[in-house]
Image: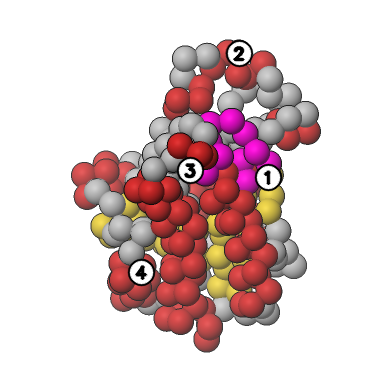
Amino acid sequence: MMSSDGSLQGRVALVTGASRGIGLAIAHAIVGEGGSVVVSSRKRENLDEALATFSDPDSVHAVVAHVGSRDDANRLVAETIQKFGRLDVLVNNAGTNPYFGPLVDIDDARMQKTYEVNQVSIVTHTAAAWHQWMAEHGGVVLNIASVGGLGPEPGIGWYNVTKAAVIYLTKQFAMELAPGVRVNAIAPGLVRTELARGLWEEHEEAVARNIPLGRLGEPEDIASVALMLVSDASSWLTGQTIVVDGGTTNQRSGGVS
C-alpha cells in the first residue's frame, strides 16, 4: 500500500510521452517519492536525453514506443512488468497537435494523427494495463487532458475535441474499472511546454497578464498535482478532472498544454 502522505515507495509507474515537458516532470516527481518509472516516447535520442536528467538510473527505464499503436501499448506494459515486476500507475500523458486552424479545413492525415495519439491511446494503454496487471492487482490511471477540452477556442478546435474525449474517457473508465482501479485526469492550462510554444513564445508577458496568478504554468506545477492523484492521498477520488491553470478558466477559456 502507498502511505497516506502520498509516498510512492516501491510503486511502479509507466508514463507515456515522457521524454520532456509534463511527462518528464511527472516521472521525476514519482521517482522523488520513491517510485520506479518506465518512460516512453517515439524517439530513442529524446529518451536518452531524458534518462540523463535522473540521478538514480536504477529507478528509471526507457522504452521506445509509438503511442498510437495498440501493439506498442501492449509491448510497453509487458516490458514495464518484466523490468520492475509490477505496474501500479499508468500516466497517459502523450499528446500532439499538428494542426492550427478552423475545423472545416483540417486534412484527414492530421485529424487522424491527433485522434490516435490524444484519444485512442488512452483506450489502448489503459486496456493493456488492465488486462496485464491491474484487473488482478489494482492500480491508478491518470490522464492528461487540457482546459481546451472544457470549451471551444479558435485555432485548436480539433485538439480540444480530442481532449474533451479524454475527460469523458476518464469518467467512463472510472465507472468500468472501479473499485480496484481509480481513474482521474488533470486539465492543464497554458504550460511552458514545447507543444504549447506557439501560444506563448512571442508574447509571454501579455499572455501572463491574462492569467490570475500572473505567470504561465510550469511542468512541475502539473507534476505536483499528478503526484497527489496517483498516490493514496487521493484514495477516495475517481472519475474527476482537476483543472490546473493559474485561475484562467475562472474568467475565460485557457490554452493548450
Q: Earlier in the sequence, mark 2 or mark 1?
A: 1
The answer, for residue 182, to whether it is visible in the render is no
Few, some or many residues within 10 Å of mark 2 (<14, 14–19, 20+): few
Q: At 44% from the left edge and 69% from the top edge, which residue is drawn?
A: 124
> Which region is colored magenta?
148-158
Few, some or many residues within 10 Å of mark 4 (<14, 14–19, 20+): some
Q: CA distance from mark 1 to mark 3?
A: 20 Å
Residue type (three-letter) at the residue carrying disc 1:
Leu
Residue tagged 3: 22
Residue 23: % across, % down: 45, 47
Residue type (three-letter) at the residue carrying disc 3:
Ile
Residue 151: % across, % down: 68, 41
Q: At 42% from the left edge and 48% from the top edge, which residue is drawn?
A: 111
Rendered image quadrant of residue 128: bottom left
Residue tagged 2: 206
Give the mark toward the camera: 3 or 4: 4
